[in-house]
Amino acid sequence: MPPAARILHHAKKFQQARNALQSHGLSVRWFTNDARPLTDKIDYISRPRPLGSGPGDKNSIPKSFNGGISNLCCSSAEGTMITGLGRNQGSFFWTARKGNAPTIGALYNSQPLYLARSFSSNSDLPPHQEIGMPSLSPTMTEGNIAKWLKKEGDKVAPGEVLCEVETDKATVEMECMEEGYLAKILREEGSSGIKVGEIIAITVEEEEDIAKFKDYTPSASGAASSPAPEKPSARAPQKEESAPAPAAVPEAKAPKPSAPSAGGDRIFASPLARKLAEDNNVSLSNIKGTGPGGRIVKADIEDYLASPGKAAPKSDAAAISTSLDYTDIPHSQIRKVTASRLLQSKQTIPHYYLTVDTCVDKLMELRSKLNTLQESSGGKRISVNDLVIKAAALALKKVPQCNSSWTNDYIRQFHNVNINVAVQTDNGLYVPVIRDADKKGLATISDEVKILAQKAKENSLKPEDYEGGTFTVSNLGGPFGIKQFCAIINPPQAGILAVGSAEKRVIAGARPELYNFASFMTVTLSCDHRVIDGAIGAEWLKAFKGYIENPESMLL
């Protein structure tokens, strides 16, 4: 029976006899697997009772519970974590806590929680808590420590910000879960590429325990460090002594491949030697191997390159590379994830594109009137992009097939119209979301876009600011004057609208000798053909064009 199942079995068996357990403590913590950031918190702590004060005191204690149990941490698929059994002088206590607060290790989208309490019978390693890198977004696999807001020795309380974590989406504040002291910081400020679940800090309950973690290092499994590993270290020399024995086997067999080399043209070389020779444009036929059976090894290539006059001439590409002056810019976390997601999108989603020109004369006229009202009331100006977002949202409401997502088993059609808006920053591309854009007024959309764009530029977006979008709008026309382009779909969405700039054009009049001027804006819809058929995409563009060319209809 697995350890977790055994503990739960005993806990259930002696539920009615908890006051009879002397000199033991059982701590059970429950974490929700809800897929959203959680805000409510429910705690229940049973009060200690003296022995004999409750029912079940006559029950006996199993031998398996005699003595202290240390360094115990296990979890189940339901999200339950039994975080430790420790010795408690006095009456038995039982704690069940259901934490639904966005705290250290609090997760989004049902990601695993990396928070464990460790107990030790060793006086030099008191009870402590190992804090792992949390998963703060659905696609996060690793993160960076942007800034520590607490230092070693500081007291921490629930709700206080411990550090800032740069995720694949934004920089998110990680809050403390329990009261205590920050005993050890294992990953310093600026550390990058920290895998989700990797231990980054240690907290303790008592201030005097801080000094005991000065030289603390976590084990490879992430469990508490203790002097226990002395036994495995004693076996290490035995492995080292036995290591040379297998090495003698290839030595005896190595000469066998040399037979073909004597009568044929094949040259035997190790893979590493071949790679090194290829990188330096060295012909293996010019090198004499010193390995078993005349095999060319890495050392032979290095000796050849080090010998006077034998160094291979640099290729044209290498010569050009060395003559260039350049700077290597490290990838930010958001740029790495954006690159991988766009590559995945382009490789796995069957894109097709629909382009249409929309006359925006009436739209610009309405915008001018609305901005006059906004200025008189002290509001912010409405941009063309705000009107585009509103028109796209209403078109999605009219043609809901485009407000969908592909899965292997079904097409999920969303009832909420949440529009992601692409925002370019120095750190990379962000797509904050305007929720229920079809139900909001233009002034509200304008305010939200400006606030979210500023937060994106400051790298301070929170998960709720960018998660849950169902469609994306990317506008390169207004800011950059791009006439027309095709955008890459933002998975798992099925469509993205690329908006170009508005330009004046000459159009035919009522008679051949007459002509007029009008402003046209080119937009291109990128569609996932698995979800949106060509006719459906064309129907959506028709609805969108109708709202843009008759903007008063958006106010109905």
Image: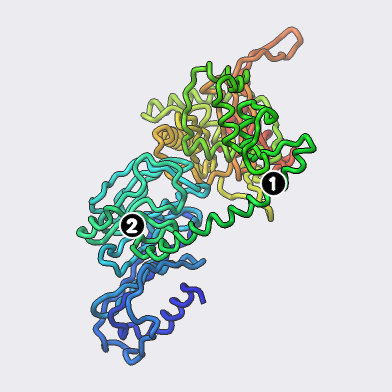
Q: Position of residue 457 (x, y in %)?
A: 42, 32
Q: Which residue has dot 1 on it? A: 255
Q: Position of residue 83 (x, y in %)?
A: 38, 67
Q: Position of residue 72 (x, y in %)?
A: 39, 69
Q: Is residue 80 left or right of residue 313?
A: left
Relative to the observer, which residue lies in front, 371 or 380?
380
Q: Is residue 494 left or right of residue 118?
A: right
Who's the residue at 68% across and 31% down the image?
Answer: 284
Q: Which residue has dot 2 on it? A: 177
Q: Residues within 10 Å of mark 1 (few under 14, many from 20)?
A: some
Q: Amino acid at mark 1?
A: Pro
Figure check: 515 above or below 218: above
Q: Amino acid at mark 2?
A: Met
- Foreground mark, 1 or 2, reads 1
**Which mark, by number, is residue 489?**
none
The kind of secondary structure element at disc 1 is loop
